[in-house]
Amino acid sequence: MGYRQGRFWQPDVTVATVVVRDGKLLCVEERVNGQVVINQPAGHLEPDESLVDAALRETSEETGWDVQLSAFIGAYQWKAPMQADGSGGRHYLRFAFAAEPLSLDASRSLDEGIVRAIWLTPTELMQQQARHRSPLVWQVVADYLAGRRHPLSMCQQMA
């Protein structure tokens, strides 16, 4: 398992949070390959880190917001298209969570590459789909808006 055509294959495991306040979604503008794109607070799972802890950490690092996770939205698999320069083609496995904002630390410096954190209505986010970092951005929000919620216990870390 994990081998394809004689090569070891392993997807990038990422987490993302859908944070809602007053009908708006917490998003980030980030610089990727010279372009400013829109994403949820999201990032890679680190070694020995639970999915829940990764979601809390990434949200804080990318937005300055401390949040409380309220539900697991779902798991998503996506393969980035190959670009002309040979980049891309990576496989992503994203675990998405719903969260409620608790407090903002405006003095916190945001992760490298993050331009700013912004609050967008679902309509504003949808209207900017051409700027989404990946199709996962809207799919996760659409599932959240459709009421997809699962208990956080679905993402237990085993010792």
Image (cartoon, rainbow, N blue to C red):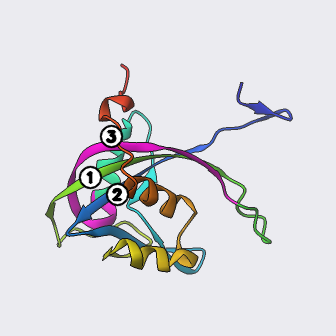
Where is residue 17, by image quadrant?
A: bottom left
Find disc 2 in the rendering and name its residue: 18
| Numbered marks: total | 3
Residue 11 at x, y = what percent? 62, 42
Task: Look at 31% across and 34% down and name the residue there.
Answer: 151
Pick the front one: 48 or 133: 133
Between marks 2 and 1, how big is the CA–CA gap?
6 Å
Find disc 1 in the rendering and name its residue: 99
Query: What stretch of residues is rendered in magenta?
Result: 60-80
Where does the N terminus fall, quadrant-wise?
Answer: top right
Q: Are marks 3 and 1 in contact (CB under 8 Å)?
A: no
Between marks 2 and 3, how big is the CA–CA gap?
13 Å
Q: Amino acid at mark 1?
A: Ala
Residue extending furthest toward the top: 159
* Marked residue nearer the N-terminal end (2 or 3): 2
Residue extending furthest toward the left: 103
Q: Are marks 2 and 1 in contact (CB under 8 Å)?
A: yes
Provide the secondary structure element on which disc 3 rests: helix
Pick the front one: 91 or 137: 137
Find disc 3 in the rendering and name its residue: 52
Residue 149 at x, y = what percent? 35, 43
Q: Main secondary structure of the magenta part?
A: strand
For residue 89, side relative to residue 70 (left or right): right
Provide the secondary structure element on which disc 2 rests: strand
Near mark 3 (Cα within 10 A), the count class, few <14, some 14-19 or many ≥20, is many
Task: Look at 31% across and 67% down and name the residue there.
Answer: 26
* Marked residue nearer the N-terminal end (3 or 1): 3
